[in-house]
Amino acid sequence: MADLKKEGEAVNMQEHAYVIASQQNKLSYRIKKNRASYVMIAPYFILFFFFTVLPVAMSIALSFTYYDMLQMPSFVGWKNYIKLFLEDDIFLISLKNTLILAVITGPVSYLLCLLFAWIINEFRGWLRAFLTLIFYAPSICGNAYTIWTLILSGDRYGYLNGLLLRWGILDEAIQWTKTEKYVLPVLIIVQLWLSLGTGFLAFIAGLQTIDKSLYEAAALDGIKNRWQELWYVTLPSMKPQLMFGAVMQITSSFAICDVSIQLLGNPSVNYAGATVVTHLLDYGNVRFEMGYASAIATVLFLLMIGTNKLVQKLLRRVGE
Amino acid sequence: MMEKQYKVKKHKKGKILGIFKRPEKKLNRSAAGNTLLFVLMGICGVAMAMPLVMVVNNALKPLDELFQFPPRIFVRNPGLENFSDLFILMNDSWVPFSRYILNTVIITGGGMVGHVIIASLAAYPLAKHDFPGKNILFSMVVLSMMFSWTVTQTPQYMIISWLKINNSYWALILPACSFGMGLYLMKQFMEQLPDSLMESARLDGASEYRIFWNIVMPNVKPAWLTLAIFQFQQMWANTGSTFLRDEQLKPLQYALFQIGAGGAARAGAAAAVTFIIAAIPIIFFLICQRNILETMTTSGMKD
């Protein structure tokens, strides 16, 4: 009798728990329960909607129109995209250049950021802050790459030409920024020099948040040198920062344009230094064909999303 | 305790080892590795410091050296004429320079502080709460960073006109508060905080806002100091000429650029402008970087 009663109670309890669980699973309940969360994200996401989501949505919509910023946009369907891939030879060149630049500078820059952040983390105090500044200098000094115009200047007074002539490696000065075959290598080198930016500082901050006792534990567990320590302790502990750095790297590697325009001009010699974004700027800011420029931006956007998916997959394997 | 050990070691082994942060970790550090890294840092450091060296030297060059061909990096007869030229030009401006400085404090400061607070406030629930719609909102923020900024400028301008905040500080501050990068950065750092930290505060009856302000934010200080650096740089680089029409609203950096853009006659003042434009974010950068280190040595909160 008592057993039966207990059983009944248990069933009742179970039912009760089930009812509560199903209530908790209901969307409206979950939204109500998390009211504080929604209030906290509201200020940001309201602004984000107005100043980012809406403009991006409008740009994507504009990519299906012809829009010269004077008349109202007129709908043209897929015409911009078709023109982009079938008629616009320069776009294809710029796409190829962008991919080459991204594939080379992206991973190398990312590793450089990590390497230098990791080395700087060995120092302390003002020396550390100073070293960080030195390595971050190209990113903080406005248009720092103007120094490369002195180095790469095409006459024999350019530093690079001067040096190579004095050493007898060259017989005559080379127009580094105006010769087709040197254009991409020049872009790659300057871009690598500029690479210690956002990701670098994020890594520096990330290294600071790693629990120091993990290192002591790892030393007891038989980790022998700094390289093992890096792979088994440091990198797994800063995975969120690695992800962040990767996204920032993708956005900067695919959007290379300032360096190209400043050093090589826009258009560069025979479009050898054209990138997707220089092409976009050409249409957006010079020819005022905003519809076409928006189509270029949308293609670039999709390209970056794809790359991001791939990179995030790779990064999940760090430290395994 | 560890700090004390470190100080003893410093006295024994001399100054060079003293600059390393964790001498107690020496079991995992070989002398050969240290030397290799030092040499690498030295060579790369020289290459990276070039723009800094050039900006400083140019600011100290008298006019004849600025126009010398071929140009030299190092100054021969350093002087401060460029700065005195600049100050004379600044006194001539019809909007007093104190007004420009006030505008910069409002725009750069507002955009920076506003973004750090608003983005952090949104990052905390995204990192630590579980609520419907969270994943889609977060991926929207990450993806938004990949859309080319050049194209969204035009629609953004229209929206700012619709909202009727054109030609006011808000036109610069509000969009700056909604940048995607800050939220992403803060969320990544907050994700690493142990849940137990917040759980115990919740048991003590603290509200989510209190937890955010008193527990989460102090523990991610390196993150928001870094974000402040980025945001300061962004806002400082923005001269606001797209949205601000009234001269009285324009920031200091705009006025400085105007003086610098005066052609060959003002080359000296322009060099001084370049120096000041670079120096202010650098000072801010150094203060922030110095503080990033100090936080974590004092609070070792992790499980």
Image (cartoon, coloured by chain):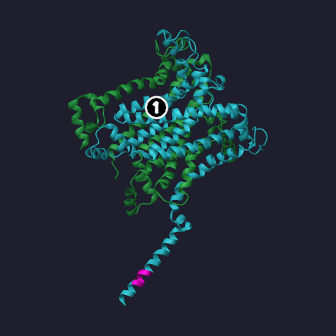
Q: With respect to residue A124, does B266 lie above or below?
A: above
Q: Position of residue A248 (x, y in %)?
A: 52, 40
Q: How many marks?
A: 1
* Residue located 30% across and 31% down the image: B19
On the image, numbered disc 1 is attached to which residue? A136
Q: Identify the magenta region.
A: A7-11
Q: With respect to residue A231, does B256 lie above or below?
A: above
| Chain bearing mark 1 | A
Asked whether residue B98 appears in the rendered view, the answer is no
User: What amino acid is found at the position of numbered circle 1 in the picture?
Assistant: Tyr
**Closer-to-camera residue (B258/B237):** B237
* Residue located 71% across and 44% down the image: A62
**Closer-to-camera residue (B132/B91):** B132
Whether residue A9 appears in magenta in the rendering, the answer is yes
Is A237 on the left or on the right of A102, as rendered? left
Whether residue A167 appears in magenta in the rendering, the answer is no
The chain letter of the cyan chain reads A
Q: Secondary structure at mark 1?
A: helix
**Crowd rating for badge 1 (residues with CA inside 10 Å; few <14, some 14–19, many 20+):** many
The secondary structure making up most of the magenta span is helix
**Closer-to-camera residue (B110/A97):** A97
Q: Position of residue B50 (x, y in %)?
A: 47, 22
Q: With respect to residue B78, does A46 lie above or below?
A: below
Asked whether residue A191 appears in the rendered view, the answer is yes
